[in-house]
Image (cartoon, rainbow, N blue to C red):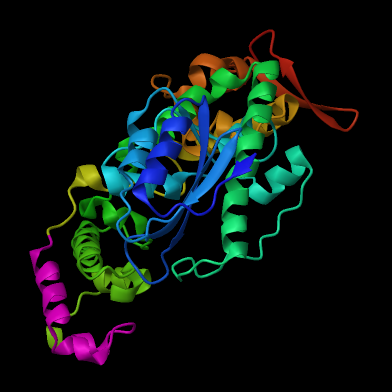
Amino acid sequence: MRIHPLIADTATLEKLCERLARSDFVAVDTEFMRENTYWPDLCLFQVANSEEAAAIDPKAEGIDLTPLMNLLVNNEHVLKVFHAGGQDIEIIFNMTGGTPHPLFDTQIAAMALGLGEQVGYQNLVESLLGRHLDKGARFTDWARRPLDKRQIDYAIGDVTHLAELFPRMLERLKRTGRGQWLDQEMERIADPANYINDPALAWKRVKVQTRRADALGRLKALAAWRELEARSKNLPRGRIMKDETLADVAVHPPQSQESLGNVRGLSAAWKGNDIGARMMEALASADPLPAAELPAREDRGPGLGKDGALVADLLKLLLKIKARESNVAPRLVARAEELEQLAAGRREGLQILEGWRYAEFGHDALDLVEGRLAFAVRNGKLVRSRVEKEIEE
């Protein structure tokens, strides 16, 4: 494979993208820093196909990344390959308002191949390529210039290995007939809606031990305010106010700005500065959370009940057994909330009752909740058996 020198000018990038546009796929990775900023600080783009690989310096003076963005977002003929690509896709979305499509994520594909639910890149390379990766440069300062050879070699190595992994995984998926299993998942992670950071929804990421409408209304207002503050200053949310403090203020709101000096987690200066005043304005504007927006109780799904909870636990056991038999990650087949909804009586709109998931698991799951399938222990082993006639109570 041809490895290019670090690309730092638009003309060279344009020629590279023209060649990559004739490929069936392009492997993609990024290096970025986010410890001290709200927005990811993009430091490097890496791309490769089966013939060539390159790192692109987005910080190079005068470089225009439009050719690369057109390749990744607007070219529907080239498959974009990532590993655990959520943060890379978020960066591209922030830059363009679009997402790479079509795409393939090797971490999700590994789930269909029985290689684990969230297999790391290093483990995947070792498992399928038999190579040990040097991760020594992983936590380097990618914003520093100039980048040294070790940094660039490390970064390019991620996409050269990815370009080798993809064809092998694709072949195994074809051989096992599981390629179609991934279509829905790949479309899901390519959906731009996943990367829209709406301040009005920021409160849902904050853990709070209450379902009181007034407290959750304050939490919603405060989380939206913090999001906008963090954006405007380009600082991490936690630098404005930590989640624990946010939740505490929402549940136990201060009566005046002066009392902010007594709130644990806030600087005493907040009792008299502008940011403290803006926070108090956000609190004052908060309305109780409407009943329709109240979160479901965390313990069990709506309407589940005690007996339904036991059925949900049996469904989770069945999922473990079926996933082990099929050598697939359980999380790819079904999520806990779907199992609880099935146990509670829902039958419409569940992915486990459609397509390959129904064939692999949903059919047996439905039989279990409707009394046509039972568990038994034989010779010390847990087995499933069909119920031929109704069991009398």
Residue 280 makes an appearance in the image: yes
Magenta extent:
259-286
* Quarter of image, res 370: top right
Q: Residue at x 88, y 33 (%)?
A: 380
* Quadrant location, the C terminus: top right
Q: Nearer the viewer, residue 213 or 182?
A: 182
**In x, y percent, where is residue 368?**
61, 21
Q: In the rendering, at what x and y percent does residue 26 appear?
A: 51, 34
Q: Is residue 240 above or below residue 102?
A: below
Q: Main secondary structure of the magenta part?
A: helix
Q: Is residue 122 magenta?
A: no
- Residue shown at the point (48%, 69%) measured from the top left: 146
Residue 280 part of the magenta-drawn span:
yes
Q: Horizontal and vertical percent for residue 255?
A: 14, 80
From the viewer's side, name the closer residue of 133 and 262: 133
* Residue at the outermost right position: 379
